[in-house]
Amino acid sequence: MTDETLTPTALSRPKRKHRRGSHRRSDIHAILDASPLCHVGYLVAGRPVVTPTLQWREGDHVYWHGSSASRTLRTSTNTEVCLTVSLLDGYVLARSGMNHSANYRSVMLFGRAREVVDPERKAARLRAFVEGLWPGRWDALRPMTEQELKATTVLSMPIEEGAAKVRSGPPADDEEDYAWPVWCGVVPIRQAYGQAEPDPRQLPGLAVPEYVEAMSDDP
Amino acid sequence: MTDETLTPTALSRPKRKHRRGSHRRSDIHAILDASPLCHVGYLVAGRPVVTPTLQWREGDHVYWHGSSASRTLRTSTNTEVCLTVSLLDGYVLARSGMNHSANYRSVMLFGRAREVVDPERKAARLRAFVEGLWPGRWDALRPMTEQELKATTVLSMPIEEGAAKVRSGPPADDEEDYAWPVWCGVVPIRQAYGQAEPDPRQLPGLAVPEYVEAMSDDP
């Protein structure tokens, strides 16, 4: 059983717009689960580097992975990282430039990234990643080899320090601006999945799996 | 007239998957122009922080902005930052877990963020930001006040060090795996704009502007 809220820290407590912030675990988890795409920040020779990658969550840990040969993975193991997930939900068009904004959901997590070393645990994490996106796919794949497992690094970070931030709803204009005659509102943005494109080298007679069909929101 | 390609550096030259990388200015600009959402990495008390924000490009500079009171803006001025833009274009489902991938376009830029101090230049940059998203909107807004301009910080970075990275197309499986009987292909992902939602406090009789109509791809 984990705490329901994370303890705010200097990094995780924004000075302004605090009303938009949350340290509730359920808020943080919901945003992590809504978008595999994340951006990991770490230091290379003292300079900040931000790498996009895919994350997944199991319980109160977040995971990401890559080639064991990659600089990103090697450099960000056992050091401080910041993992940020953000979803742009809409443009907010207000009556003044100043009050234009964006609707979004974001999570920033801080901590030390640690490598999942034990091969069985590592394999279980990779399986959970694939199954989380496409339930039932892992067992249909050509089985993972020992060499592939070695060539893959899985990093893990406890969800301990961080916060969620959310903005939603219509523009918040200065009271005296509401009489200004310009169209205002929200242009909603969402991630849309298109019709699956079968591999041209696909064996004949293989149906599109249900988990792929279910993703597409094209008519 | 700017160079056609950026000079590769230790940070901007990835060790692997080099085939996916590009230092061509036109490739970098196209990706920056395709997505305002970016993630800026910088240091707070020696720890990396990754903040989502919106960027825009003018010529060979990239800009972002925020409240002059915000920690992000204050901490990332005149220091090294990494600005990353990434678009997730699809999930690539292969025959082995190892060869699963994502189609994406990304740009990583490195450099020092500098404040645009001159009020006229700063106002021009903010105007360009709004006009870039919604052509014709700036002049329809309640004009920006001097106080609002002061309360806004605009940061700028020359596009000098960095690279684009792109993955596209079907899965790239190990040759001996092509006989494996599992559905493979790409699930395309795109950003979709919904029907605009007028502000409930909207003055009556204001039509949805063309630049908002043009964004929506709902029928």
Image (cartoon, coloured by chain):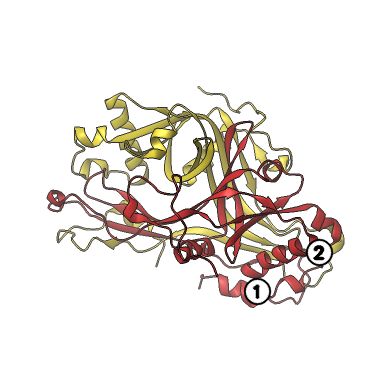
Chain colours: A yellow, B red
Q: Residue at x 55, y 70 (%)?
A: B1
SS category of the residue bearing label 1: loop
Q: Residue furthest right?
A: A176
Measured Cα–Cα span from mark 2 to mark 1: 17 Å
- Answer yes or no: is residue A97 visible: no
The answer, for residue B74, to whether it is visible in the render is yes
Side of A130 where B190 appears, left or right? right
Residue B30 drawn at (x, y percent): 48, 65
**SS class of the residue under badge 2?**
loop
Residue that appears at 72% across and 58% down: A171
Q: Earlier in the sequence, mark 2 or mark 1?
A: 1
Q: Position of residue B28 (x, y in %)?
A: 48, 61
> Which of B201/B71 is in front?
B71
The tag on residue B135 is 1
Residue that carries the numbered disc 2 in the rendered image: B144
Residue B160 point in image, percent of width and height: 53, 56
Name above or below for residue A59 compared with residue B188. above
Q: Nearer the viewer, residue B44 or A108?
A: B44
The residue type indicated by label 1 comes to Pro
